[in-house]
Structure formats: structure tokens, C-alpha cells
Image: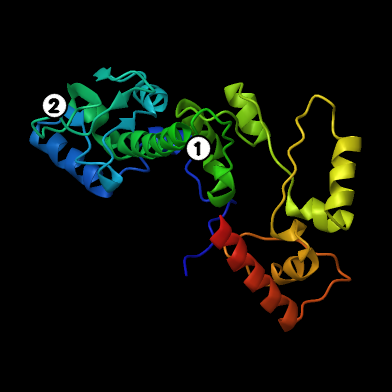
Amino acid sequence: MPKPTPGRDFYLATEDEIRAGRTTDVYFVRTLDILKKAGRSRANVVAEATTGGLPNDWPWGIFCGLEEVVHLLQGKAVSLWSLPEGSVFPPKTPRGVPVPVLTLEGPYEEWALYETPLLGMICQASGIATKAARIRKLANGKQVLSFGVRRMHPGIAPLIERSVTIGGLDAITTPLGADLLGAPAMGTMPHALVIVMGGPREAFAAVHKYLEAKIPRIASSTRTTTRRRKPCSRSRRSRTSRGFGSTPRRPDEETSPRSSERCAGSSTSAATRT
């Protein structure tokens, strides 16, 4: 088990660490050292960023992450050509040649340590934007909200929400994302409110009474709001069918094997109907 790192509460690289090349693969550090000693570190090099293919043979992707790449390369003696951010691109030409989404040229030592972070910036952002755009297309004009940050590290929440916005989703969920992107932060109603208020009726009434009038009312109706709400809410305290989700409980509630059994049956039926 790695030892805790003094002075670092969260395992996230700082902007200065990224710019200093601390997040690159170490073989680029060693390569640059070798080239400097050999007198070849200033050789002019051209690099293209392409994708060999997309998941499940998707025919198109959304290019995203360019803004961060530009910030990364600021002050460096390099030339950068790229698709505009948000562009739709095919992974390959009709002849099967990978399509460059970005081309970089300059003395190698100017950008040698940035290949790893550069690729990470465009790969992750483009992947999120592409998936968001596919969902946007399938929604066929219906409103789509992004709840993606609840399953990812909070340190990259702004990246995720920027990418889904470029991918075409209608709203994000975090106050920070709203401040940075100028996009609306929206949400539904968490199970926690239903449980703490004592039931869906009470929760809906509280939302309507206390929430600002300008905020849209979106009430969740899920397993915890069916006629088997109580058994379900008890069961979900001890297990969840979706990753590491959590549902809070009131201290006076208890869990019984029988109620867990009934909830599992109810969940299966709901999933089948969906």
C-alpha cells in the first residue's frame, strides 16, 4: 500500500506539475535526456494525433479538449493545427487512413514532455463528448441532463461537464461547472430527500414550498417512491445495483432480510418493464 503523500489531500496533478512534465511517461524524460546528450534534442519533429478506431465501430466522434492543449503549449516554439473544438470527425478515411484531428510541429525538446498529457487531454474529453453527442442524438429533441460526475473523481468534474456541454447536452449538475461554463446547473430530487422527509408526498410538497420559484421542479419517481417504498429504502442501505451508489437512512429504520427480498423482486420487475 503506497504511503500517504504529505501536503496532498487529493491525488490530482496541479497545473504547475503538468506544465513541468511531471505527468509524462518517464521514457519521454529519458528520451529527451539522451537526445540532449547526443545533440539532437532540437530536431524538428511533426506529430499527428489520430484514432485507429472508435468503440463498437462508431462511424464518428466529437473532437474535444483543444482549449487545454493550447494552454499547455503556450510559450512553446511549436506550431499547432487542429480541427475546431466540437467538430464531428470520422476515425478513418474511406481508404482506411486514420484522420488526424491535431498536428504538432516544432523542435522536439519544446514538446517532448507533453505528448502524454496532450493525448490525455483530447482522448478523455473527446470520449466524453462523443458519448454525450450519441445520447443527444438518441434523445430525439428531448431534454438531456448530465449526471456523469457522480461516478467520477470530483477533481475532473469541470472537464466532464465542459465535454458533455460540447457534446450537446442541455444542462450539467454542479455549481462549479455552472460558474466556469456559464451553463445551467439542474437536478432532479435525490432519494435522500424522500427518506428524510418521510415519503414522496412530503418530499414533493417541501420542494414545491421551499425551492425558489425560478427553479424547475423535477420529481424523481423510482424504487423508493413505489407502493413498496419502505422495504426498498431499507434494502438499498445495505446494497445497490448501480456501482457504489449510496442512499442515506434515518437512524430509527432497520433492515430485515424479508424486506430486502421483496425489494429485489420489485427492482427486477421494474428493470424488466423498462
Seen at 66% across and 31% down, the residue is: 185
Q: Secondary structure at mark 1?
A: helix
For residue 160, the mark is 1
Can residue 6 be seen here?
yes
What amino acid is labelled 1 in the image?
Ile
Q: Are marks 1 and 2 in contact (CB under 8 Å)?
A: no
- Tag shown at residue 36: none
Q: Residue furthest front?
A: 273
Residue 60 occupies quadrant: top left
Q: Residue at x 55, y 51 (%)?
A: 151
Instruction: Point out residue 164 in the picture as x, y percentages from the top left corner.
Output: 49, 33
In the image shown, does 197 or 118 lie closer to the viewer? 197
* Residue that protrudes farthest toward the bottom in the picture: 257
Image depth: mark 1 or mark 2 in front: 1
Q: In this view of the protein, can residue 244 be seen by the observer?
A: no
Residue drawn at x 64%, y 36% as measured from the top left: 173
Q: Residue at x 69, y 71 (%)?
A: 263
Q: Pointer 1: residues within 10 angstroms few (<14), some, or many (20+)?
A: many
- Callout 2 amino acid: Val
Query: Who is closer to the viewer here, 53 or 81?
Result: 53
Looking at the picture, how far across and down is residue 217, in whole percent?
Answer: 77, 35
Residue 37 at x, y percent in the picture: 13, 37
The quadrant of the picture occupied by the C terminus is: bottom right
Q: Please tell me which of labels 1 and 2 falls first in the chain.
A: 2
The residue that disc 2 covers is: 45
The location of residue 36, given as percent across then percent down, is 15, 35
Crowd class of label 2 (few under 14; some 14 to 19; many from 20; radius 10 Å): some
Classify residue 19 by image quadrant.
top left
CA gap, disc 1 to disc 2?
A: 32 Å
Give left or right: position of 242 versus 263. Answer: left
Q: Secondary structure at mark 2?
A: strand
